[in-house]
Amino acid sequence: MFILKSFKHLLTPDWLARRAFSAAALARIEAAIQQSEVSHRGEIRFAVEGGLPLLSLLKGVTARARAITVFSDLRVWDTADNTGVLVYLQRVDRDVEIVADRGINARVTQDEWEAICRRMEAAFRAGRFEAGVIAGISEITALLTWHFPARASNPDELSNQPVTL
């Protein structure tokens, strides 16, 4: 199993793994994030990665561990209210992970995040990549609006632009 997974990751070029997200699709995802953040104090980032690098595969890095690293690298934790959320898609395996900062994790359970991830993965299995991401953002928006409604001053602290790794 490990060998098959490794070959799958190593032999899938990044451009092929990310072709599900055209420039126009990424722009629409960015717009969905921007619109979402008007209604709450959270900051959402979306990152998509093709295959994992060889060293990560050899170390047995999971999608969750990689998402936590990306959360740190993108500084999603760097918000005033600790309300950053990363939606990470590891494209080769179609694995979605949501990593939230401690301010959000105090109010939103891991089970709620997992449910959103599974619905996004179901959309991806059906080939609906953009729709799956936008539906996931919509569900995250509902949670954040409930727990962290917007204030009169609601600065946009992090970039809304999706990241391809």
Image (tube, rainbow, N blue to C red):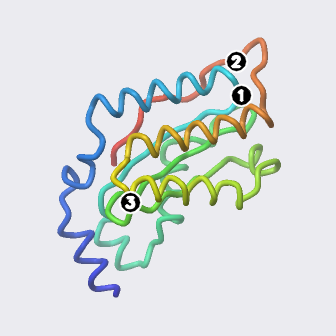
Image depth: mark 3 or mark 1 in front: 3
Residue type (three-letter) at the residue carrying disc 2: Asn
Number of callouts: 3
Q: Residue 2 falls in which quadrant of the image? A: bottom left
Residue type (three-letter) at the residue carrying disc 1: Arg
Q: Residue at x 19, y 53 (%)?
A: 16
Give the image location of residue 54, x and y in percent.
28, 71
Residue type (three-letter) at the residue carrying disc 3: Arg
Helix, strand or loop at mark 1? loop
Within 10 Å of disc 3 (Cα), the crowding (few <14, some 14-19, many 20+) is few
Q: Residue 24 falls in which quadrant of the image? A: top left
Give the image location of residue 107, x and y in percent.
82, 48
For the residues labelled 1 and 2, say whether their Cβ atoms are less than 8 Å apart.
Answer: yes
Within 10 Å of disc 1 (Cα), the crowding (few <14, some 14-19, many 20+) is many
Q: Residue at x 40, y 28 (%)?
A: 28
Asked whether, in this view, residue 79 is left or right of residue 60, the answer is right
Q: Of the two numbered discs 3 and 2 on the same chain, state the one appearing first in sequence.
A: 3
Asked whether, in this view, residue 49 is left or right of residue 39, the answer is left
Helix, strand or loop at mark 3? helix
Residue 41 has which mark?
Answer: 1
Marks 3/1: CA–CA distance: 31 Å
Residue 125 has which mark?
Answer: 3
Depicted 83 relative to depicted 36: above or below: below
Q: Of the two numbered discs 3 and 1 on the same chain, state the one appearing first in sequence.
A: 1
Location of mark 2 (residue) = 154
Q: Residue 138 falls in which quadrant of the image? A: top right
Q: Of the two numbered discs 1 and 2 on the same chain, state the one appearing first in sequence.
A: 1
Give the image location of residue 91, x and y in percent.
35, 57
For the residues labelled 3 and 1, say whether their Cβ atoms are less than 8 Å apart.
Answer: no
